[in-house]
Image (cartoon, helix red, strand yellow):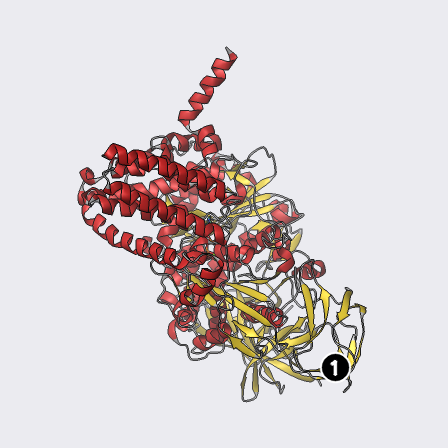
Amino acid sequence: MEVKGEIYRISGPVVTALNINARMYDVVKVGDEGLMGEVIGIKGEKTIIQVYEDTSGVKPGEPVIDTGMPLSVELGPGLLKSIYDGIQRPLPVLKEKMGDFIQRGVSASGLDHNKQWEFKPVVKKGDKLKGGKIIGTVQETENILHRILLPPNVSGVVDEINEGMFTVDDVIGRLSDGTELKLMHYWPVRHPRPVKNKLRPTIPLITGQRIFDGLFPLAKGGTAAIPGPFGSGKTVMQQQLAKWSDAEIVVYIGCGERGNEMADVLNEFPELEDPKTGRPLMERTVLIANTSNMPVAAREASVYTGITIAEYYRDMGYDVSLMADSTSRWAEAMREISSRLEEMPGEEGYPAYLAAKLAEFYERAGRAKTLCEDEGSVTVIGAVSPPGGDFSEPVTQNTLRIVKVFWALDAKLAQRRHFPAINWLTSYSLYGRTLDEWYTKNVSTEWTKLRSNTMNLLQREAELQDIVQLVGSDALPDDQQLTLEIARMVREYFLQQNAYHDVDSYCPMINQYKMLKAILTWGEKAVLALESGASVTNIIALESRDMLAKVRFEKDIDVVLDTVMKKADEEFAAQTHRGK
Amino acid sequence: MAKEYKTIGEIAGPLIFVEKTEPVGYNELVNVTLADGSVKRGQVLDTSKDIVVVQVFEGTGGLNKDSGVRFTGETIKLPVSSELLGRILSGSGEPLDGGPRIVPEDRWEITGAAINPYSRKPPEEFIQTGISTIDGMNTLVRGQKLPIFSGSGLPHNEIALQIARQAKVLGAEEEFAVVFAAMGITSEEAQHFMYDFERTGALERAVVFTNLADDPAVERLITPRLALTAAEYLAYECEMHVLVILTDMTNYCEALRQMGAAREEVPGRRGYPGYMYTDLASLYERAGVIKGKKGSVTQFSILSMPGDDITHPIPDLSGYITEGQIVISRELHMKGIYPPINVLPSLSRLMNSGIGSKRTREDHKAVSDQLYAGYAEGLDLRGLVAIVGKEALSERDRKFLEFADLFEDRFVRQGMEEDRDIETTLDLGWELLATLSESQLTRIDNKYIEKYHPAHRNKNKKTVESSTE
Ligand SMILES: Nc1ncnc2c1ncn2[C@@H]1O[C@H](COP(=O)(O)OP(=O)(O)OP(=O)(O)O)[C@@H](O)[C@H]1O
Ligand SMILES: [Mg+2]
């Protein structure tokens, strides 16, 4: 049923309409060109709409049509390898239809409706199905089997189900009540997809980034925030996570950030190999790019589009990780719309519901038992861009109240090119304990000890540094000078990791363990040598120390570490002799 | 001819509120005729059945309730043509050089549509500026947006000009152009640019838009958009590589703030509008390279940081959008070092794709990282020495302290006309690094040390010599 109203007022992306009786969050078509919009407020006679495209030239009096549908995405095979704008329009299709610059008034559906997929049913006539049940499979990419799900809100008895080649529009079967089954279904983006129940996150998301896996681990199904001033490394780290983390599916949202960064991902991902499967990374990735110069209302929608797609793959039983770069731009989009609505502003002009929206979003993360009794997870990692790098601002603060892992980027570290510029003193992970069991079982029984020793060493270094600032390092006793040197080794040889180095970019968990152990063992030997009379100057000049520095650039570290530690033993032995 | 309304209900700052109109389009161009017959231009900011809000670019001075308002039914457009080259135009696009009106080949909307991210080609062509701190450590590439963060009284104009003069892509003879947009700068500063453009013959290849300090502030909101539209035309229609210089973005942002205040909007940080990030992005993001197109738009904007404060919303929001920043330091300037570029807070995010064996030299990244680390360490020690004295430093630390001085004096400092090629810059870097002990060069792969470190180089040379004997 179409209801036609008319435009009363246009103020940027916010349009006020009269004479339509739309529901909140209904999608409407605005103006002669039918620009896509969404109802975001109803005030008496007036319906307030945010429009996902540029409104230049639109006039009062032009028509507004209610579609009666909420803002939804198309879920089905073909999502992987796609790049979408904030409202799931494929950018390659937009390019085909309107050239290199994004014009408006063009619609494009999220999935390719012409492509045929080979469907293999896993249910048969007479099966009684509940919502969310798997009805069959489609090989979506080489390694990803797309499980076709009955929409969560549909259930019934299978009357007919067919095998064969189908498009997403074809009817592949029927339920006994006549409901048609297809390869795709729609889902409203602002509604979390249901799960059976949530599970405790007890498995780490291994990222191949030493400071994350080693010191501040994130769990599959967990939530993390990466706040930091401009140029401190949020995007690089988000991209590292998208590339190397052991999630099966990655949803990457460029929310109000740079066009070139998205172009970069598009360029790089098809070339890079997934360390687990050896297949191009792009085959497990969905990109959403609503850059800073694209319409703000679509930016607001982009995070919902992304998380809905992530939940959909979770419901198939996959471990999904979602990166949103940057959640601050999303919050700003809310602020911009809110101020056009002349709502009462909260802190720094953000709407009073900012905290609630952030909480709702992160709440959609989690490890869960799905409706089809499988296990899946959505891990959410949000970048935060605090103005002036000041973490006391509302978006950072409200985010920190929700997320369990805090990776604090530090401008000072970035300036001295200590990358990743994660501050090891202020960052934290609340999953540490929960994940210990996994690390003990899968990495080493020594792991937790090693980690706490490392943290203590870094803590100790910070205390000593305070003293150095007052008296200079030469005034410290030898053992403390040595502690500083060993801590420096942990920082420079272990925590630093160059995202642009072929080998260093990704460090397998087992190598992380071996490297850290080697460094700390070297440190213990050094302490012993000092006690038996060697000098700090001689100890830090040892060749084995320089050799340790370069281990992170080596592919096959077992051989190298072996050589280094043998060398260390020889050198320390010589030192001790000389000392005596 | 569009209908003329004499129904201005209210005038507030740069805004007029027009009543009882036929439906008027959002963002439409508006002409306002004054009693003396002169015409001012404006743009629709908010439109409804009852009232239309218009911002007037040339300011509302001289307007009254009897002024005639005409809605043109179209958004603001710039007449574009390759004949724009060599022309000097006002901040709203009118010829200032006494030349003829531009005969348009086309008329382009000045707001410019967003480049589809899928159409972008990642920028990767190294631009050699001849300035060591930029080429060596904050490499600029074609299609990048890299601003200069400066302060009042600092030589940002000289640096911008030196870059405009020296910038080249190695081994390429291609058509290039400069688009220069002045926003609220003094006429003396503008003269300085014009003089240099004329002296070097660059003017023939340039389009100049000038909004000076005494021109209306609102006009500044369209000046950069005109300039970028001209740049896009030259890049994507005429296949030129265009360098856009926008100066001073701080004046642009002030105009934006003024506008926001006039509209009685809820202000964001320090009174700047909450949408300033989005607004600035609509300018900065207009740099880039498009797949399958020959030309490119590279942006070099200048902004002065109020109170030298990099956390001020203007540099802060810019830094969040641009692909790095070149930061000018008052301290280095006071020490008499030109160009006083402080490399530590400076950054080029696209550097990695523009350097390396195929583009500059294989050791480039490592040298740059090591220079950074060394200089940062040296500066820390400088701070420490001020408290504890040099004697408290270890031998290693003393080396780093000296390194920082050498770095500023030899690497940072160079002449205004000195055009160092990339080899010279990198070799100079090695020469300075050689003053540190080799084991301190932890950022550099051994294979580069063996190949490029002066100590080994000489050795290598000797073995080559002896083997030829
Ligand atoms: N792990 C890393 N390894 C090497 N270089 C890095 C790393 N992290 C960051 N960098 C360097 O820092 C630069 C800035 O990083 P990035 O673009 O991720 O910053 P950002 O925090 O996303 O900034 P913005 O908020 O402006 O988007 C990169 O271009 C790169 O040079
Ligand atoms: Mg970023």
Q: Is residue A29 above or below residue B89?
A: below
Task: Tell me the quarter of the image containing the N terminus of chain B.
Answer: bottom right
A186 and A64: which one is in front? A186
Residue drawn 38% across the image and 33% down it: B414
The image quarter containing residue B254 is bottom left
Residue B217, quarter of picture: bottom left
Residue A502 visible here: yes
Residue located beneath label 1 in the image? A127
Identify the residue at the far bottom of this view: A44
Mark 1 near ligand 2 (CB under 8 Å)? no
The residue located at (36%, 56%) in the rendering is A424
- Nearest the viewer among B28 and B167 is B167
What amino acid is at disc 1?
A: Asp
Residue A442 coordinates in the image, percent (x, y): 49, 59
**For residue A117, above or below residue A133:** above
Q: Which of the pair A353/A367 is nearer the observer?
A: A367
Is the residue B41 above or below the residue A35 in the image? above
